[in-house]
Amino acid sequence: MEKIIVKGVNQLRGEVNISSAKNSILPIIAATILCPERVVINNAPMLEDVEVICKLLNELNCDVNISSINNKLTIDTKNITSMDPDAQLIRKMRASFLIMGPMISRFGYCKLSLPGGCNIGSRPIDLHLKGFKLLGADIMIGHGFVEVKAKKLIGNTIYLDFPSVGATENIIMASVLAEGTTIIENAAEEPEIWDLAQFLNKMGADIEGAGLGKITIHGVKSLKGISYTPIYDRIEAGTFMIGAAITNGKIKINGVNEEHLRPVIEKLKECGVVFSDYKNNSIIVDGTGEKKPVDIKTLPYPGFPTDMQAQMMSLLSIVDGVSVITETVFENRFMHVAELQRMGANIKIDGRTAIIEGVPKLTGCQVKATDLRAGAAMILSGLIAEGQTEIGDIYHIDRGYVQIEKKFRNLGADIYRIDS
Ligand code: UD1
């Protein structure tokens, strides 16, 4: 079992390069199923989740080539035969369910195990299924599986009760080759949805409004193979911004789209962090100043991202005063609180709200990465905790961060991985 060991306290200094967005590349890989031609994805982040979805495509008999030398992913889906991939792989990662839209679009059939993923709430798929049904598909659920059949998908207007990221993506992918026009209302607006639509439009799809609440998809007959580079990972960049803030450090982050990080940057500014020199996708983050407590409510984009909530809590746990974090996106996303409390944080939970009273210092101890972003929060807290922090269950962290300990080490952190 691998562990990450962090020894505090070192101010971060230097530069870090951000990888491509995990939450972009997963739907983009799923979308390659829509086109029986070769697709090349450049600058692919070599993550556990990317490996899982590639294995899934292998299961379907796709040809997937990963070049770790230049991080190029080449995918050819023309020989897909299986319509019923391995249930274990599907359960490993919720994003596996993103192959459903493209599969029913191209083959009119797919059977998948009900998905898994981070243990941060019930995370149903009702909105995905509502979309497929309105496009004309028949849905059967039983024995832990979802089976979707569609002789033909026909465009429709689909209103999402909640702007679900995955449902928006799955419905976009199901409708690019459907007959007629599909309109998704109350669609998720995350930058990764815009990225998926850019990718599909480059392949020949006709999608308007992605990144806004109303997306219009005019069905096309076919798509063509292309080469594409996904956007930068805003959550990884945000994690390093908090790294600078929590250690009173100053770093340059390369691979930032300031617009995508607006909600995080604005909160960090309110907290006392200074940003400067934003040019050519780089930004300087100066966390050396005094910090003030802030209140945060997680919301769908362009609100404050739930994927930055745990990391922000690490920072606020050592900021003098009282901060309040309200989690509105997932119902069970405070599992890191118990771990932070073990390190000495003073946090109380009341339903979906966490009240954080800043303490002068945290102390290192054995903690667990209870989910992906909670794992990043443990590293951040370890950076300023007195003594040594030993983080277990780091497979969660590897799902979404490329060589995280190496990137922090390059910034001056005392952090390494052990096999125990
Ligand atoms: C995506 C991101 C994840 C991020 C989340 C919210 C990927 C691969 N993952 O996950 O990192 O934390 O967006 O920004 O992009 N819901 C329903 N019914 C549905 C679908 C969702 O009720 O059919 C609910 C979920 O239970 C949850 C909320 O909607 O409470 C948000 O989920 P959703 O936006 O779908 O997140 P994911 O796509 O799973």
Image (tube, rainbow, N blue to C red):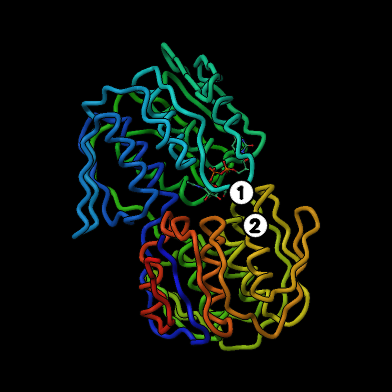
Number of residues whose C-alpha sits closer than 10 Å to that of mark 1, classed few (under 14), some (14–19) or many (20 or more): some
Name the amino acid, label 1.
Ile
- Labels 1 and 2: the sequence-earlier one: 1
Q: Within 8 Å of ligand 1, the CB of disc 1?
A: yes
- Quadrant of res 365: bottom right
Circles 1 and 2, Cβ within 8 Å, touching? The answer is yes
* 107 lies above or below 40: above
* 55 lies above or below 415: above
| Residue picked out by circle 1 | 120
- Quadrant of res 38: top left
Tell me residue 132's x, y (percent): 51, 23
| Residue picked out by circle 2 | 335
Q: Residue at x 35, y 73 (%)?
A: 406
Viewer-side residue, 262 vs 37: 37
Q: Residue at x 29, y 32 (%)?
A: 59
Q: Which mark is residue 64?
A: none
- Quadrant of res 293: bottom right
Viewer-side residue, 212 vs 303: 303
* 252 lies above or below 296: below
Callout 1 secondary element? loop
Asked if one can make out residue 279 in the rendered structure from this viewpoint, the answer is no
Left/right placement of residue 358 relative to residue 65 reads right
Left/right placement of residue 377 relative to residue 153 reads right
Tell me residue 155's x, y (percent): 49, 21
